[in-house]
Amino acid sequence: MTSKSGDQFLFKSAELAEGEFREASVEADGNPLWLVVTRHNGTPRAWLNVCPHQGRSLNWAPDKFLVDPAGRLVCAAHGAVFDPADGACVSGPCQGAALRAVEVSEAHGEIRCAPEPPG
Ligand code: FES
């Protein structure tokens, strides 16, 4: 067993396809923390589901995210575009900013994260 204490289950590996964006919530310091989770080049990645432009959720409905033809995440509020490799905003009103990354791991068919409470 290698999971760290505080790790929280997000998805089974099979529930997160390459290029898919999913919404998840975990608990940090007793508060819910909403995440956007994707799989990019085979590796799961997660960020806080908070757009650096105006702090809104990136999705347009529960677990529904916009994706452009290049497979990049698009904020539903004003169209900021984020690179799934690193969460950087590559165009739109907060170009040059980035989503806040959350550490995720994948082992034994599960994707888990160890969220840090917002500072
Ligand atoms: S809040 Fe995301 S682009 Fe404005």
Image (tube, rainbow, N blue to C red):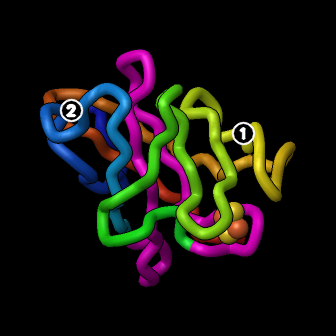
Residue highlighted by disc 2? 1
Q: Can you say whether 108 is above or below 110 in the image?
A: above
Q: Where is residue 56? Give x, y as percent.
A: 61, 74
Q: Label 2 amino acid?
A: Met
Q: How crowded is the residue under tag 2: few (<14 C-alpha within 10 Å), some, or many (20+)?
A: few
Query: Ligand 1 lies in which image quarter?
Result: bottom right
Q: Where is residue 78? Give x, y as percent.
A: 67, 65
* Residue occupying image coordinates x 61% and y 47%: 101
Q: Quadrant of the C terminus?
A: bottom right
Q: Does the magenta run of residues contain 3?
A: no
Q: Can you say whether 71 is above or below 76 in the image?
A: above
The mark found on residue 11 in the picture is none
Span colored in magenta: 27-56
Q: Earlier in the sequence, mark 1 or mark 2?
A: 2
Q: Does the magenta run of residues contain 51?
A: yes
Q: Label 1 amino acid?
A: Ala
Q: Where is residue 95? Give x, y as percent.
A: 83, 47
Measured Cα–Cα span from mark 1 to mark 2: 33 Å
Q: Quadrant of the N terminus?
A: top left
Q: How many marks?
A: 2
Q: Is mark 2 within 8 Å of ligand 1?
A: no
**35 or 76, nearer to the observer:** 76
* Residue occupying image coordinates x 44% and y 25%: 40
Residue highlighted by disc 1? 88
Q: Can you say whether 84 is above or below 57 in the image?
A: above
Where disc 2 sits, the SS reads: loop
Q: Where is residue 17? Give x, y as percent.
A: 24, 31
* Residue occupying image coordinates x 74% and y 74%: 54
> Residue 44 occupies which quadrant of the picture?
top left
